[in-house]
Amino acid sequence: PTIYIITPTYRRPEQMPELIRFAQTLMNVPNIHWIVADDANTTNYDVVDYLTYSSIPHTYLLTPMPEKYKQLSIKPKGVANRNGGLMWVREHATSGVVYFADDDNTYDIRLFQEIRYTERVSMFPVGLVTKAGLSSPVLKNGKFHGWYDGWIAKRKFPVDMAGFAVSVQYLLKMQNAEMPYKAGYEEDGFLRSLKIEPEEIEFKADKCTKIYVWHTQTKKNGPSQRTILQSKYNGTNLRILE
Ligand code: UGA
Ligand code: MN
């Protein structure tokens, strides 16, 4: 089965290094289709050129966040991107598996072997670099027992975006399944819309004892002086990405 990897991305100084790092991982994974969904109104040719160079089967989508959400202080990040990716899958795929892979996480290629044979919805641990250290289903005697996560809240599925996969066939059956524009509740809302119960989840990664994906973050630096720097070097070899 093909794995459809939906990756939200947006223009910022970290964008190219994040995508390069992830692409280098994906170059080692067979039978994938990488859907890179850009939160932008215009094509970013740095991204497109790199995708072409990588030879990874891919689709580049423009999936801008609607203006009304951009004004919020806590934005629903990556939602327009993921719903756009889901629409593409619904139109183009009849089998396979969907996985939401943020551009800034750290992926072990064994993850893709684990999720490739998802029948409906699979779940597995995600390493966190926070105090909690981990987000994972809790199993006892191999059966669903509960959840471990730094922030359970009132979520039915208190899991990380990187901690689950869905089969295309199941997704196609769930015609209304989509991700809500609700910061903090994106995973929960989407998984609820799949109408699955925790007991029915397929638990991967050696019964959730292995960590094959980490939720990581790249340190941000203020991009403020970049435009000033760039203008100073107009007409030279230097091109400073925004
Ligand atoms: C966490 C979750 O893991 C995300 O899946 C979730 O979307 C996000 O929180 C959220 O706040 O809703 P976090 O590491 O805090 O992730 O968020 P980012 O990595 O900054 O963004 C998640 C994804 O959305 C990334 O792939 C990023 O490239 C993309 N993004 C972010 C956009 O497309 N537009 C934005 O304005 C911000
Ligand atoms: Mn992130």
Image: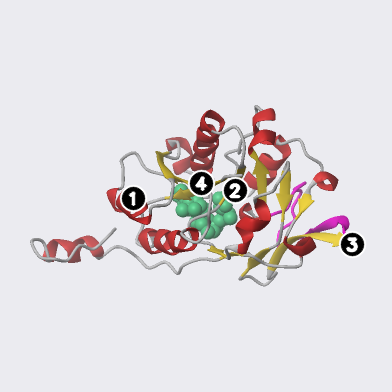
Name the amino acid type tagged 3: Lys
Please report the residue visible at 55 percent of the width from the left and 34 percent of the height from the top: 93
Nearer mark to the viewer, of 3 and 1: 1
150 falls in the magenta region: yes
Q: Inspect this view and state whether residue 39 appears.
A: yes
Name the amino acid type tagged 2: Tyr
Which residue bears the numbered disc 3?
Answer: 140
The picture places residue 94, in percent across and down from the top left corner, at 60, 32
The disc, 4 or 3, on the residue closer to the chain's N-terminal end is 4
Q: Label 2 to label 1, Cα distance in Å?
A: 21 Å
Name the amino acid type tagged 1: Thr
Is 239 situated left or right of 213 in this image?
left
Q: Label 3 to label 1, Cα distance in Å?
A: 45 Å
Crowdedness near tag 4: few (<14), some (14–19) or many (≥20) residues, C-alpha within 10 Å: many
Label 4 beta carbon less than 8 Å to ligand 1: yes
Is 137 situated left or right of 89 in this image?
right
The picture places residue 156, in percent across and down from the top left corner, at 77, 46
Which residue bears the numbered disc 4?
Answer: 78
Name the amino acid type tagged 4: Gly
Element type at mark 2: strand
User: What stretch of residues is rendered in magenta?
Assistant: 141-159
Nearer mark to the viewer, of 4 and 1: 1
